[in-house]
Image (tube, rainbow, N blue to C red):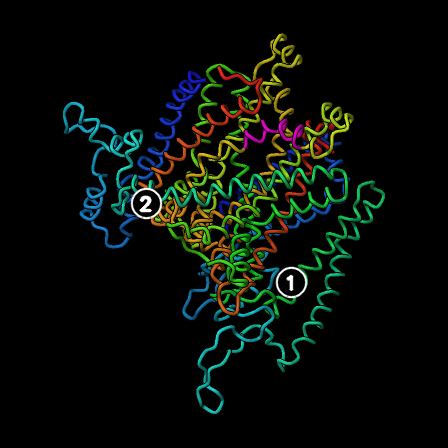
């Protein structure tokens, strides 16, 4: 197991290098630092001097790959490629274009994101599985068909409508919770409860429908029929036989997103004014702060790869037949 | 009149041609025809298809652009013609004057008065503060009190027009298809309902603002209908871009194996490890920088917005091929182990011919299912992307932009709900129809469900 994880981590290196190269090409080759300077400073009244100043301030005044004016190792390190891309591997994200320390920002904003994303995720999965099991219990009846139509209807509604509608109904009409905001202390719950509820509800349509097909597939197996003919109750069959056997496909879809929960949700956080990584990304996209976007792309890829490894490990836990080697 | 062909216009008609050829070639294939028959033999499938087809028709009508000639001004040489700085589409012509019926600001559906009070001069010269009457809504009325009666009257007229249209549209269909086993009756009812709704909307919409007006005074109904083109085109063009990349790479990886497989796997693992929304955001922003720095490429504003739109489609396609590629690769691996492929190898058939004759036709179901499944996902994604600010150009009408503009409006007092309602209605109908249709297509084409595996 340990050897397996180490090997997977080594495999991750070329992927991260690929991500790094891709972002580098996107941010520095497709668009030169001059272009970025020009769009940051606004198109009018841009002098060559202003561009040079901007580049110097943000550390873009170096050659892309190879610095001929320096000797030895610094001919490689004093380049944009090294200072902006290679250093990401050392988790040194540098400064955002507005001059803030990205690492500190990320470390600070991670927790509000997690406080919102983790409950949404956990309660969401639990709700979806329960709803799906309930529907599977009534398979073949009108209730089942009605539920499927309802699920398709629910998943056809844009996420944004859930948020706008939920905010309007619960926070504005009924005044149950504040509309938006955040509190660093334990009182944050009253700000978090509405986004969590909306997040869970908006996921039911697609989620429960997906779990329903998984459970149905399992419930056609012979061992389920055997269990039923032994006289086990339907509840026991669902929880003891159907659910464990459907775990592998569930884990495939679920575990990989767990590390990504740190990244938060762009839309949710900005609607509810939660100062997490999601709204951080959104702000930086709006301000065209490429340094932050670049760092977040890199963090996201690392988390995704961790998610893939976790998925494999979770298989061994769900299915004793699976061995990692 | 001067015809304008936008990039997205050309691409959507190319796509329609591709799909038409695809279906024309498929007609010979008995199994595929049978599966399509299964999709259309359910009433739900028929209705969903009619709804999608109507949206596509509207999108196509809205993709035929031209620039109207301006009235010659005095002193202008006779042989010189100037054109309007904006492009009009055939759909705009069909919708009458709705595009030009701008008010000053918000107004409620069917309202005759503006939503906000302004200072006005009364007839006797004194200054009063009241809701000003709208410029365009109900201007044919002599007395505002006649409004309810007039709406009923106009509805009635619209109904008669709609019935005439229905008769001409559905009548021939009935004549040719009356002996078919397929549930055409549901299709006709759906068509009749759609014609009825649209004729009513357009007819009454020219007299009143059926869905009110937005902040800038534009007719919300007009904007919602114009949003159809953006949604449909984005949903199809992005997949059109994605398909060739995913299929080529997937087939190569699965068929040639070895180092080709390694490279392709490396590519899609790398790509899928980047958070999708960030990659899209970064690409769109960079593309936007490019457009901003090269303003000379575009003669009218719409072309600029269109360039960004086509760019967005490309970006969505180029960033989303990983999933399909993985599926195609796995399926190709499976197919190339089969005996007839081995036999073809033994006979010395070239790789190209084996892929063309034996592998690609067996991938049709995956491609089809992906196409219909991705469609609704893309329409929904457009709204979120526009909210984040990396969607279609703010100058281009889309449901995402409408939601984005309207998200603060509900919190006003009294709430302004109609912009959201308009976007919601048109978007929900399309996505729901697409989801229902894709379910049926999957049931009919996916071997897993065809063999009765997961089907209840």
Between A219 and A58, the one lying in front of the other is A219
Q: Is B329 a magenta residue?
A: no
Residue B177 x %, y %: 81, 44
Residue B388 x %, y %: 44, 49
- Nearer to us: label 1 or label 2: 2
Q: Is residue B163 above or below residue B236?
A: below
Q: Does A145 sit left or right of B306 as displayed?
A: right
Instruction: Assign the magenta stretch its main secondary structure.
Output: helix
Tell me the residue that label 2 is attached to. A289
In the current view of this chain or complex, which residue is farthest to the bottom?
B124
Residue B100 can be seen in this image: no
| CA distance separating discs 1 and 2 | 44 Å
- Residue in the image at 33% along x and 40% along y: A107
Q: Which residues are magenta?
A: A239-253
Circle on res. B329: none
**Badge 1 element:** helix
């Amino acid at each position: 197991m340990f050897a397996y994880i180490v090997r997977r981590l080594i495999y991750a290196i070329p992927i991260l290098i690929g991500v790094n190269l891709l972002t580098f090409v996107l941010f520095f080759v497709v668009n030169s630092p001059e272009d970025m300077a020009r769009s940051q400073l606004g198109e009018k009244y841009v002098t060559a001097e202003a561009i040079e100043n901007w580049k110097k301030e943000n550390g873009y005044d170096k050659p892309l790959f190879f610095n001929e004016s320096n000797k030895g190792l610094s001919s490689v390190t004093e380049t944009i490629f090294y200072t902006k891309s290679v250093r990401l591997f050392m988790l040194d994200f540098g400064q955002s274009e507005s001059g803030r320390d990205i690492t500190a920002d990320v470390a600070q904003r991670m927790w509000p994101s997690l406080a919102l994303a983790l409950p949404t995720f956990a309660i969401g999965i639990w709700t979806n599985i329960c709803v799906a099991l309930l529907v599977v219990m009534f398979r073949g009846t009108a209730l089942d068909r009605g539920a499927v139509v309802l699920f398709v209807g629910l998943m056809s509604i844009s996420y944004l409508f859930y948020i706008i509608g939920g905010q309007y109904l619960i926070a504005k009409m009924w005044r149950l919770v504040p509309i938006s905001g955040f509190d660093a202390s334990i009182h944050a719950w009253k700000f978090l409860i509405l986004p969590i509820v909306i997040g869970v509800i908006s996921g039911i349509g697609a989620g429960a429908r997906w779990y329903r097909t998984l459970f149905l597939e399992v419930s056609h197996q012979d061992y389920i029929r055997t269990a039923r003919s032994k006289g086990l109750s339907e509840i026991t069959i669902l929880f003891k036989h159907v659910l464990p056997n459907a775990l592998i496909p569930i884990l495939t879809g679920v575990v990989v997103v767990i590390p990504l929960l740190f990244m938060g949700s762009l839309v949710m956080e900005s609607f509810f004014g939660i100062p997490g990584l999601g709204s951080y990304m959104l702000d930086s996209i709006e301000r065209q702060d490429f340094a932050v976007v670049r760092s977040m792309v890199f963090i996201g890829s690392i988390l995704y790869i961790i998610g893939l490894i976790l998925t494999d490990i979770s298989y061994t836990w769900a299915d004793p037949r699976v061995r990692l080697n | 009149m001067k015809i304008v062909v936008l990039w997205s216009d050309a691409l959507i008609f190319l796509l329609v041609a591709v799909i038409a050829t695809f279906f024309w070639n498929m007609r010979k294939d008995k199994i595929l025809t049978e599966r399509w028959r299964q999709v259309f033999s359910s009433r739900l499938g028929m209705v969903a298809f009619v709804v999608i087809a109507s949206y596509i028709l509207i999108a196509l009508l809205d993709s035929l652009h031209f620039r109207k000639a301006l009235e010659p001004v005095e002193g202008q040489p006779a042989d010189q013609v100037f054109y309007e700085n904006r492009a009009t589409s055939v759909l705009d012509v069909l919708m009458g004057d709705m595009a030009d019926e701008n008010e000053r600001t918000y107004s409620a559906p069917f309202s005759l008065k503006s939503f906000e009070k302004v200072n006005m001069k009364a007839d006797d010269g004194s200054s009063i503060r009241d809701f000003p009457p709208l410029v365009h809504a109900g201007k044919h009325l002599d007395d505002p009190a006649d409004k309810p009666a007039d709406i009923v009257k106009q509805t009635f007229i619209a109904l008669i027009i709609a019935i005439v249209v229905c008769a001409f549209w559905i009548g021939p269909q009935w004549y040719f298809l009356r002996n078919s086993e397929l549930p055409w009756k549901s299709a006709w009812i759906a068509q009749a309902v759609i014609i009825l709704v649209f004729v009513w909307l357009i007819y009454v919409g020219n007299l009143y603002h059926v869905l009110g007006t937005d902040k800038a005074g534009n007719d919300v109904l007009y904007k919602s209908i114009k949003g159809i083109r953006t949604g449909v085109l984005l949903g199809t063009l992005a997949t059109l871009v994605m398909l060739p990349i995913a299929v080529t790479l997937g087939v190569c990886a699965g068929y040639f194996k070895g180092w080709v497989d390694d490279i392709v796997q490396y590519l899609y693992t790398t790509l899928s490890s980047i958070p999708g929304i960030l990659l899209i955001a970064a690409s769109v922003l960079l593309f936007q920088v490019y457009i901003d720095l090269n303003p000379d490429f575009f003669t009218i504003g719409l072309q600029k917005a269109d360039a960004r739109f086509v760019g967005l489609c490309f970006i969505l396609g180029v960033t989303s091929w990983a999933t399909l590629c993985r599926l195609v690769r796995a399926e190709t691996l499976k197919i190339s182990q089969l005996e007839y492929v081995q036999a073809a190898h033994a006979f010395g058939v070239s790789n190209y011919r084996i892929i063309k004759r034996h592998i690609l036709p067996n991938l049709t179901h995956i491609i089809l299912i992906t196409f219909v499944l991705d469609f609704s996902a893309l329409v929904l994604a457009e709204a979120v992307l526009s909210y984040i600010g990396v969607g279609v150009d703010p100058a281009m009408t889309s449901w995402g932009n409408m939601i984005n503009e309207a998200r603060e409006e509900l919190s006003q007092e009294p709430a302004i709900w109609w912009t959201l309602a308009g976007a919601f209605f048109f978007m929900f109908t399309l996505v729901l129809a697409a989801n229902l249709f894709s379910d049926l297509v999957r049931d009919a084409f996916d071997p897993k469900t065809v063999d009765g595996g997961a089907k209840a």
